[in-house]
Image (tube, rainbow, N blue to C red):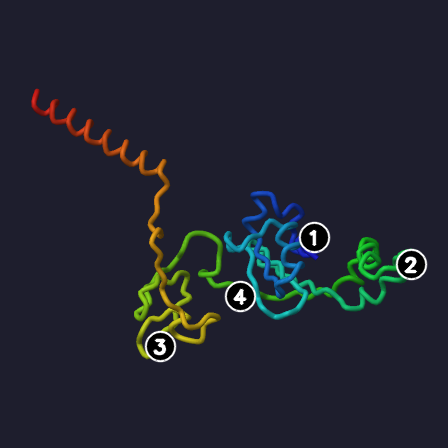
Amino acid sequence: MAMLGCRLIGLDEPTRRDQIKKLIVYVEMDRCTADAVAHVTGVKLGRRSLKFMDYGIMAATFVNLESGKAFRVISTEEARSLAPAYAPKIDQKYPQQLEAYKSMPDSVLFRVQQVEVAISEFDLPGPTRRKVVCDQCGQVVRDHREIIKDGRTLCRPCAEDAYFSNARDVTWPDMNWVPERSRQASAGADRNENRWAGAKDDCWTED
């Protein structure tokens, strides 16, 4: 899927630095396909080149940011039923499918759609383009994900139903714990700062 999608948009080595900057991939299911696509193409959530759309469909859309070309590649269910024809010597279901997929042509494995994807500037890779503060909880919201409700700027958890509930801040005695080595380094830095301050005082006295 990933290799076909990248070929369709003109990227033959998507992990190469000059090509990875041109690529955004939308995956439509949070299962092994998403991991496989990320591994083959090099796209990452943290790089903002991998987008997750929770459709429950084994499909991915590959976008070339430079050319604007985009293709959606959908895995076919028919490929599974055809596995015995492509790997007749293997009896077990999953090993048979894996072997069959190696020899199946792309036209059997996938359906392909040429599509258009409107990408907001706030969804592009690169530095944060906008930051606002939620009027209710004070949390910083990045990349235009805030919601304006009754004239107030709100983060999504404050504005609508969140995936979590009954949130309560917690503390514990050692939450501000610092490793001993860090304490020693910090103390050493303070001593050096004091020495430097004294040295500056001596210089100023001589002047």
Helix, strand or loop for disc 3: strand
The span from disc 2 to disc 3 (Cα, nearest Å) is 60 Å
Q: Nearer the viewer, mark 2 or mark 4?
A: 2
The amino acid on which the numbered mark 3 sits, given as a three-letter code, is: Lys
Q: Residue furthest front?
A: 173
Q: Are marks 1 and 3 in contact (CB under 8 Å)?
A: no
Res 82 quadrant in image: bottom right
The span from disc 2 to disc 4 (Cα, nearest Å) is 44 Å
Q: Quadrant of the C terminus?
A: top left
- Is residue 174 toward the left or the right of residue 66 in the image? left
Q: Residue 3's x, y, as percent?
A: 70, 52
Q: Residue 155's x, y, as percent?
A: 38, 69
Res 58 quadrant in image: bottom right
Q: Residue furthest bottom?
A: 150
The disc, 2 or 4, on the residue closer to the chain's N-terminal end is: 2
Q: Nearer the viewer, mark 4 or mark 3?
A: 3
The span from disc 1 to disc 3 (Cα, nearest Å) is 43 Å
| Residue at the disc numbered 3 | 149
The amino acid on which the numbered mark 1 sits, given as a three-letter code, is: Met
| Residue at the disc numbered 4 | 118
Q: Which mark, by number, is residue 3?
A: 1
Who's the residue at 39% across and 61% down the image?
142
The disc, 4 or 3, on the residue closer to the chain's N-terminal end is: 4
The amino acid on which the numbered mark 4 sits, given as a three-letter code, is: Ala
Helix, strand or loop for disc 1: helix
The span from disc 1 to disc 2 (Cα, nearest Å) is 26 Å
Q: Are marks 1 and 2 in contact (CB under 8 Å)?
A: no
Q: Nearer the viewer, mark 1 or mark 2?
A: 2
Who's the residue at 51% across and 55% down the image?
48
| Residue at the disc numbered 2 | 88
The disc, 4 or 1, on the residue closer to the chain's N-terminal end is: 1
